[in-house]
Image (tube, helix red, strand yellow):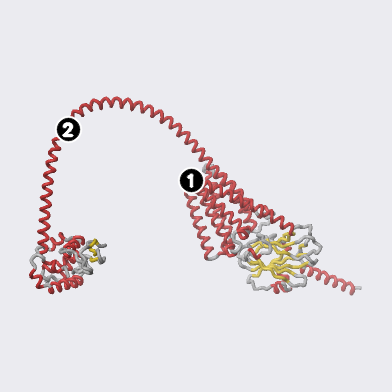
Amino acid sequence: MLKNLTISKSAAFVFLFGLLISLRAFSQAPVEVNDNVSQQIFSFNQIEVLKDPGGKLSFDQISSKAYHNQFKPSKTSTPQATSFNTTYWFRIRIKHNSKAEKYFLLEFFDQTIDHITAYIPQDNGTYKTKIFGDRYKFSQRVLRHKNFELLIDNKNDLVQTYYFKIRSSQVADAIIVLRSAEWFIAYALNEYFFFGIFYGMILVFSFYNLIMFIAIRQKQYLYYVLYNLSVGLFEMSNDGIAYQYLWPNAPGWNQIAYAFALCAASIFALLFTRALLYVKAKAPRLNQVILWIIGLRIAFFVYSLLFNQNLFSYKFIEFIPLSAAFFTGIYIYSKGYLPARFFVLGYGFLFLGFTMKLLIMLHFDWINFGVISYYSLSFCFVLEMVFLSFAIGDKVSILKKKKDKAQRQIIKQMAVNAKLKDNLNQELEHQVETRTKEVFHKSLIIEAKNSELQQANDLLLQQAEEITRMNILLEQDNQELQTNVEKVTRDRVMSADVDFEEFSRIYPDKESCNLFLAELKWKNGYICRKCKNTHFYAGHIPYSRRCSKCGYEESVTTYTIFHNTRIPINKAFYMVFLIFSSKGKISSHKLSELLNIRQSTCWTYGTRIKTVMEERKSKLKKTNKNGWSELVLD
């Protein structure tokens, strides 16, 4: 009897131990397909997670018994893939119902997941693979919807396990929902309808303020338009609407588009704050802080874009510019600036929505109570747009009141000015009348004086005519004298009777030297060296002559000792004159000192001049008036 009792106790122990093992093995709660339940979100023990840091585990390993107990139930209602570019495995169990009349599908609510590999169980025990994610073109999706949908086969009554391999470059929410097709269609249509209202409001507010900017030309309207459009683009990137409608074939751009929009929204929000609240004038220190935040935000964006795009996922950094704008509005309002009240109210709602999203991201699950909390930031964006528009309108209204008050003061002042003007005009009329009488009496005196002045003017006119005649005679004498002086001077130069200083005064620049060469070269008339024609036109360079027949142009220095010389022509003139006047005995060192030219250049050009002198030695002895000019022409 005792032995039988002992055996019974052992059997009971084995039975309980087996029962515990069985409960452990099947502890994951399956979700049943039921026509009466339109949707079921997998959460807590309904979805299990296994982290694969190296990403080396295969599906065969994951689905084996060795890894069966390594999956852990989700500790939160919304499991997340928090490590960037790390592989996560998720497992759910579905109890199929072949008697269900509705079609069902699985939907991934987070449309920002990069890679999802779904392993779908088949009736024969094998698995079919389906790959999707936002790194693939939108056209590859089974359903043209912003989220990821997976149709399930509900032809058996088995409890089957689904595996999902997820990898993303940002924090990904593994929100998996079992939905009936009817519920999905109704939900999708309603969602897109409200999206249309939301983005339509953004466009309407933006278009209205753009018109205001064109009409008034105030920067605050332009900043507000750009801020609204940036917010709209960020929301569209987050919702997947942008990927569906704007860039469906650009998955690479879709990965970072939200970062551009978010950075632009922060920058234009701060610029709008500065312009709307006159921060530069009312709070100079806060203005400097805002400018620093804008600079740092741009620097962070550029660094993230170029070096580590994973940093784009830290969206909570926008808490800094948002707080700066919110605090600025509170501070300006505390200083008595009334338009800041709606600004503070609008940013208060935005601050609340941002805080709720941040707390949900930090797994405060009691806040995540449904669609309102999930889209809380979008709702707060709408409220912010409304109140910011009120703030702009309030500012315009206050400005209009100030303008009306100023106009009333101007009208009042204009009435006072008109009265003063009448009094002043009466006084001026009296003074003018008195002054007119005085002027009339003085005009009689002036008329008498004018008669005397007229007589004196007639006498002066006669004297002026005589002086003019004498000036004409003197001018003629001066011209004759100048002609004689120039003639004598040229004769002295040609005879080499002047010193270097006087020569420099006679030929001080290139113009005078070219004129002398032209007169010397063509003193006997022009003859073309090509066709012997005697008619010419002025050339393209000063003092050159171009043949009227063949077009050959001859410069003033061609066929002279100055042709192709590298020193200024006036200095070349002086060098010829000095060498001739010294009969070739002047040294190159002396020429370099007098002309401020390198000694080697003076030696080279001086040698050329002395060679010509030696060749024309006999001719130079016979010259009486030509002098050194005989050395010039070839």
Q: Of marks 1 and 2, which one's residue comes earlier in the chain?
A: 1
Q: Secondary structure at mark 2?
A: helix
Quadrant of the image occupied by residue 419: top left
Q: Which residue type does callout 1 highlight? A: Lys
Q: Is residue 272 shown left or right of residue 615? A: right
Residue that numbered label 2 is attached to:
454
Q: Quadrant of the C terminus?
A: bottom left
- Image location of residue 387, percent across then percent down: 58, 46
- Image location of residue 601, percent across then percent down: 20, 71
- Image location of residue 103, percent across then percent down: 76, 61
Give the CA separation, mark 1 to mark 2. 73 Å
Q: Quadrant of the N terminus?
A: bottom right
Residue that numbered label 1 is attached to:
282
Q: Which residue type does callout 2 highlight? A: Gln
Local crowd size for mark 1, using a 10 Å CA cut-off: few (<14), some (14–19), many (≥20) = some
Q: Is residue 161 shown left or right of residue 199? A: right
